[in-house]
Amino acid sequence: MHRLALLVAGALAAPAPAQTFGPPYMPGVWSLGETRNCETGPAWVFLADGYYVEVQLPDRGPSATGLWKDEGKAIAYTHSHMPYKDMMTPNELKRLTIEERTADKLVTRNYRGVARVFHRCPENALKANAAQGEH
């Protein structure tokens, strides 16, 4: 199985904490775009350990990665594109300001004022790349 798919499965396997207050549980696969598309297209995978990766569903590996933190009214994140030329350089902390939030949808605005809409996908939306050998 694709290493990223294994990491995601393991990081998402922890049960969501019971929520009586605060925002919905964030870790998971989220398609990016005006409409929900969990079969193909750009997505962010928020891992429970505070990392995220940008992928192309269903099976293209990461194109960028960073750290993330749910601040309630914003998602704080760092960002590095592959092949990580800036890996040893401190990344600027950016924020996606949350304008609308449900358990399955986030409407946000980035630091440039551009809308970014995320839709929660099932965990199995991220597949192992068929061209990659078994590990």
Image (cartoon, grey):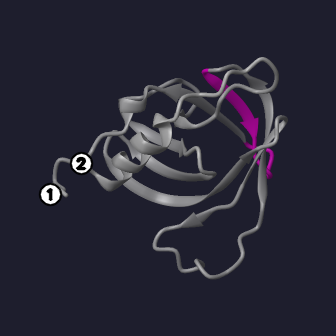
State the residue at coordinates (34%, 50%): 60
- Residue 117: x, y in percent? 64, 32
Q: Which residue is mark 1?
A: 133
Determine the secondary structure under disc 1.
loop
| Quadrant (top left, top right, bottom left, bottom right) of the C terminus | bottom left
Q: What is the spatial separation of the Cα atoms under label 1 and label 2, in whole angstroms? A: 8 Å
State whether residue 26 is above or below residue 66. above
- Residue 9: x, y in percent? 40, 40
Q: Which residue is mark 2?
A: 1
Q: Does the magenta run of residues contain 61? A: no
Q: Which residues are magenta?
A: 104-114
State whether residue 60 is above or below residue 35. below
State the residue at coordinates (77%, 24%): 100
- Residue 93: x, y in percent? 78, 61
Front-most of residues 11 and 65: 11
Determine the secondary structure under disc 2.
loop
In the rendered structure, which amino acid carries the disc numbered 2? Met
State the residue at coordinates (59%, 50%): 49
In the rendered structure, which amino acid carries the disc numbered 1? Gly
From the viewer's perspective, tell me whether residue 56 is left or right of residue 64.
left
- Residue 53: x, y in percent? 51, 53
Front-most of residues 29 and 33: 29
